[in-house]
Amino acid sequence: MTHITSTHLADGRELLYFDDAGSPRPRSVELTQDRRDLPARGEPGEVRYDALTGEWVAVAAHRQTRTHLPPADQCPICPTTDANPSEIPAPDYDVVVFENRFPSLGPALGPVPASPGWGTTGPAFGRCEVVTFTPEHTGSFSGLSETRARTVVEAWSHRTAALSALPGIKQVFPFENRGADIGVTLHHPHGQIYAYPYVTPRAAVMGSAARRFYDDADGRQTLTGSLLRAEREDGSRMVLESDSFSAYVPFAARWPLEIHLVPHRQVPDLAGLTGEEKDELAHVYLDLLKRLDALYPTPTPYISAWHQAPVDDLLRPASYLHLQLTSPRRAADKLKFLAGSEAAMGAFINDTTPEQVAERLRSVTVPASPAEALAPAAPGLIEQGVTEPDLIEGAHA
Ligand SMILES: [Zn+2]
């Protein structure tokens, strides 16, 4: 069992320690007093309604005043030392989740305005949390032990349930941005969780397609479940299968590297997984990340995005948890940039075939153990733990 300790930072932000199963060092409240003198938290930014598309845009101009990233010896998510009173006021930890100090959404909570039109604005309600995967400043998720990965899965699950229950929250999105190639400067492995006060544009498109399919099937089938079945039967784009999960390159992959990891059982979100499924997820997710990192001599930049059912009575019954793992990398030294067709029109042009990508991911040699993946003697498998510079302090996906 993961041991969870909840506390608050000096400015009132919530922080939770998730200790590995069998961890010899459960946290005590005494260990977790934040002794820094922090200013009071600010008001939320603003959301504006884009009447052309029906989408909300978060305007986080207040975050321009945030401090720049400190040097590496003052990493904000390393364990606290006398020289570095970090965001995590403990001498050691396993996995920590805390509220972002400079959030794009929140800290206040509430609904977006009803019946919006041109000129409609509202507070940028919601919540942004940081998830640290390890106390080690370098490394990457793919180098975590299975026990530690399982603790991260538990943290995602816990936060999904907790954030979904907050007033006004419509979607909870755990994700990780990783890769020096895409502008990352912070070396400490971590991800984020955004809790939005609206259903995001991509989730809305996917949610309505899923709902249409579900209605056409009289509620007996889901779209994702049907695609999962089709991919498993076809087989040509499969990457791996376990008892409870399958991973495949989707038929119409948009990115040079794109993998969907789907549970065999329809569950709305990570909080809906059983303990056994979470154990298995930790294993298969690590396997996938190791495959990505083994493709090229250097670590592969990626976005790991958990698609969860929106907190919405209409969309939720048809929704189906899955991971979309994507990378813009199209060769050892080449990245795909989103240019005119993709950025302006959302019309993707993929230079690789999904079948070839799946074959590469199936056949790549994966390091056998986390220790091997982290060993300095294995260049190319070492990840310098990277993320975008402003992720800690607020961050855009
Ligand atoms: Zn660090």
Image (spheres, rainbow, N blue to C red):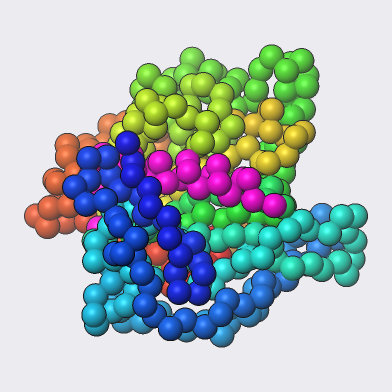
Q: Identify which residue is drawn at 29% across, 64% down.
A: 31
Residue 237 in view (yes/no): no
Q: Magenta includes 142?
A: yes
Magenta span: chief secondary structure: helix
Q: Magenta includes 369?
A: no
Q: Identify which residue is drawn at 78% across, 19% down.
A: 216
Q: Identify which residue is drawn at 43% across, 60% down.
A: 7
Q: Nearer the viewer, residue 326 or 123?
A: 123
For the magenta stretch, what is the residue range?
139-167
Give the position of the N terminus as an image quadrant: top left
Where does the image place residue 59, in percent across and percent down from the top left?
A: 69, 72
Q: Nearer the viewer, residue 300 or 173?
A: 173
Q: Nearer the viewer, residue 185 or 2?
A: 2
Quadrant hosting residue 269: top right
Where does the image place residue 104, in percent across and percent down from the top left?
A: 60, 68
Give the position of the C terminus as an image quadrant: bottom right
Where does the image place residue 109, in percent across and percent down from the top left?
A: 68, 60
Q: Identify which residue is drawn at 76% across, 56% down.
A: 111
Note whether 361 is above or below 120 in the view shown. Answer: above
Residue farthest front in this picture: 30
Where does the image place residue 231, in percent across and percent down from the top left?
A: 50, 22
